[in-house]
Image: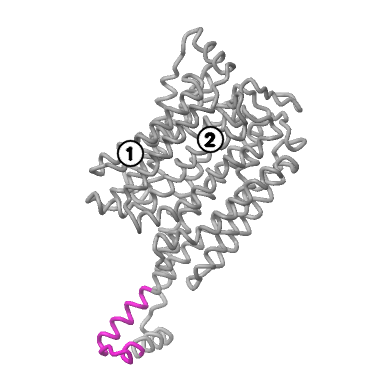
């Protein structure tokens, strides 16, 4: 435990060297913007990719699953790898791997080749966020971290918001290959700037030399358990709904493997003196609660970023581009609020900002739950805007308060766990939403069809009016009746789909309400300073 009022921060671990810390914060955010943007863009291009590579849509979803598995495996150990390889060196290796594998993705001649390249891309992308957050924590004193995380937060929150718009434009106007190829010049730019301006502090070099002095002890068992546990969990969460969950022998098997591996991992890592993942950090009050809140933020960001464009396309028939444009208003709001949040984090208690943000999210989802199938473009844009207002006030204070009470040498491990929570929360959020949509759509459709009783006067009258309208527009009586039945069925499907989305929105809102009281458990003192936390 670190004593209250003691920050533990020292400039000798700064990645800035002789350069401006703000320049470093901007430079190291470039690669994560690229990685997070790519993840959200790929979602809207699956059908184009499947058609181009002569694969089914279900087969093409392994493009997403493969990336998530690789990401899940590398994230928990990225802090350890950063300590062993060297923070700057590991960061540059991750950027180089991501850019090189992006090139292979863009040139992929087959689905199998693309999936293998996506695995490599996930291994590279998973190492970025941990190194970046560790650099920010070590480069900025506690009173300036809020503003530093505001710069970094633009990448994590803004990229998923604008991703569908960019992805829609690329898939509708160009080729899906450019979704991956655009990463190559960005990756080269990032590598060049990092090589020129980012410093590897002597303090980290000394820590690494000390680690190697007694011989490097590699926790192979821990790594294997992480790969089995989180890799299998990602398969369960990402493929569960498509494969009918536990009706599938594959999903059931991976669930058992995941549960057994994760339980064994916890026991194994807690008993080791030099674990590959420092799970004991989760026992610190602030850090444990921050991880829970970061998982909730991930579920909100990734869950809603996926289902809002999906709602617009399935219910309103929007193109990928138009659905993405409806999300743009939220992105603009986030862009302007991030700097303000960074400033406020130095003046206002983090738990007040987090609590306010969660209340805003509750209101936003409540408003969203009152939309209907007659909504227009601006209804959807305003709904997304309301939600986007709260996101900056979640990510930045959570990121800042998570490191309260931690020692400087724990920043790499802390950053890796925090990013595991964000990604895992996002995957769980997406899985919950997609499962609810499938099950509730079937439920609502069955209930609505029950009312289509030929003996029901309102049904007969409605069908007769639709048929008569079609006859007046030149259809024959038989054709008009068939078309009327088809239109009626499509209306039912649309209504059932809309009701399913509303059910999913209510569940997300209730989840936020449940997590809200944990704000009062956070230990904070004077804003902008680091304080001890159990």
Q: Residues within 10 Å of mark 2 (few under 14, many from 20)?
A: many
Q: Is residue 269 above or below residue 516?
A: above
Asked which quadrant contains residue 104, the reply is top left
Residue 90 drawn at (x, y percent)? 46, 25
Is most of the magenta stretch helix, strand or loop? helix
- Magenta segment range? 469-490
Q: Residue 219 vs residue 378: left or right?
A: left
Check contact, mark 1 vs mark 2: CB within 8 A.
no
| Residue indicated by mark 2 | 27
Q: Is residue 242 above or below residue 286?
A: below
| Quadrant of the drawing holding the C terminus | top right
Residue 64 drawn at (x, y percent)? 37, 44
Q: Which residue is painted at 49% across and 45% down in the image?
A: 426
Q: Earlier in the sequence, mark 1 or mark 2?
A: 2
From the viewer's side, name the closer residue of 123 and 478.
123
Q: Is residue 486 magenta?
A: yes
Asked which quadrant contains residue 109, the reply is top left
Residue 121 visible, this orientation: yes
Mark 1–mark 2 Cα distance, whole angstroms, equals: 22 Å
From the viewer's side, name the closer residue of 169 and 379.
169
Residue 63 drawn at (x, y percent)? 33, 44
Q: Residue 227 vs residue 196: left or right?
A: left
| Residue indicated by mark 1 | 103
Q: Which residue is painted at 58% across and 37% down in the image?
A: 291
Label 1 or label 2, whichever lies nearer to me, is: 2
């Amino acid at each position: 435990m670190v004593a209250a009022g003691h920050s533990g921060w020292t400039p000798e671990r700064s990645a800035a060297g002789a350069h401006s810390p703000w320049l470093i914060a901007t430079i190291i955010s470039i690669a994560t913007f690229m990685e997070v943007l790519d993840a959200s863009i790929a979602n809207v291009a699956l059908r184009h990719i499947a058609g181009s590579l002569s694969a089914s849509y279900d087969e093409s979803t392994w493009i997403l699953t493969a990336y998530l598995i690789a990401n899940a495996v590398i994230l928990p150990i990225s802090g350890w790898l950063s300590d062993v390889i060297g923070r700057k060196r590991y960061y540059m290796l991750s950027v180089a791997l991501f850019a090189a594998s992006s090139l292979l993705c863009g040139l992929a001649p087959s689905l199998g080749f693309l999936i293998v390249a996506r695995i490599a891309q996930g291994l590279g992308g998973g190492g970025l966020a941990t190194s970046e957050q560790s650099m920010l924590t070590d480069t900025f004193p506690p009173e300036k971290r809020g503003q530093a995380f505001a710069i970094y937060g633009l990448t994590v929150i803004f990229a998923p918001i604008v991703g569908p718009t960019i992805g829609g434009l690329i898939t509708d106007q160009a080729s899906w290959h450019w979704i991956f190829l655009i990463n190559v010049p960005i990756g080269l730019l990032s590598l060049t700037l990092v090589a020129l301006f980012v410093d590897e502090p002597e303090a980290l070099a000394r820590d690494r030399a000390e680690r190697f002095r007694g011989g490097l002890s590699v926790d192979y068992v821990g790594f294997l358990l992480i790969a089995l546990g989180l890799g299998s969990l990602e398969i369960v969460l990402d493929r569960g709904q498509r494969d009918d969950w536990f009706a599938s022998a594959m999903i059931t098997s991976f669930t058992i493997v995941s549960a057994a591996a994760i339980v064994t991992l916890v026991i194994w890592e807690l008993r080791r003196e030099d674990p590959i993942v420092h799970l004991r950090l989760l026992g610190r009050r602030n850090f444990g609660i921050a991880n829970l809140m970061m998982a909730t933020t991930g579920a909100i960001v990734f869950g809603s970023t996926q289902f809002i464009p999906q709602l617009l396309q399935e219910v309103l028939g929007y193109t990928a581009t138009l659905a993405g444009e409806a999300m743009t208003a939220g992105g603009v709001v986030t862009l302007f609020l991030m700097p303000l949040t960074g400033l406020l984090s130095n003046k206002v208690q983090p738990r007040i900002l987090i609590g306010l943000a969660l209340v805003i999210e509750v209101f936003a989802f409540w408003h969203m739950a009152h939309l209907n199938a007659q909504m227009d473009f601006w209804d959807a844009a305003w709904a997304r805007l309301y939600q986007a207002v709260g996101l900056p006030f979640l990510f930045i204070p959570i990121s800042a308060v998570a490191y309260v009470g931690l020692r400087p040498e724990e920043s790499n491990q802390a950053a890796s766990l925090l990013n595991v929570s964000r990604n895992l929360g996002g995957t769980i959020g997406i899985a919950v939403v997609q499962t609810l949509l499938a099950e509730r759509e079937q439920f609502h459709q069955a209930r609505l069809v029950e009312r289509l009783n030929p003996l029901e006067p309102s049904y007969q009258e409605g069908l007769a009016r639709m048929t008569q309208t079609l006859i007046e527009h030149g259809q024959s009586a038989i054709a008009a009746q068939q078309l009327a039945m088809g239109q009626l069925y499509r209306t039912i499907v649309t209504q059932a789909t809309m009701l399913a989305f509303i059910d999913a929105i209510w569940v997300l809102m209730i989840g936020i309400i449940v997590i809200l009281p944990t704000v009062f458990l956070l230990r904070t003192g004077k804003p902008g300073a680091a304080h001890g936390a159990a």
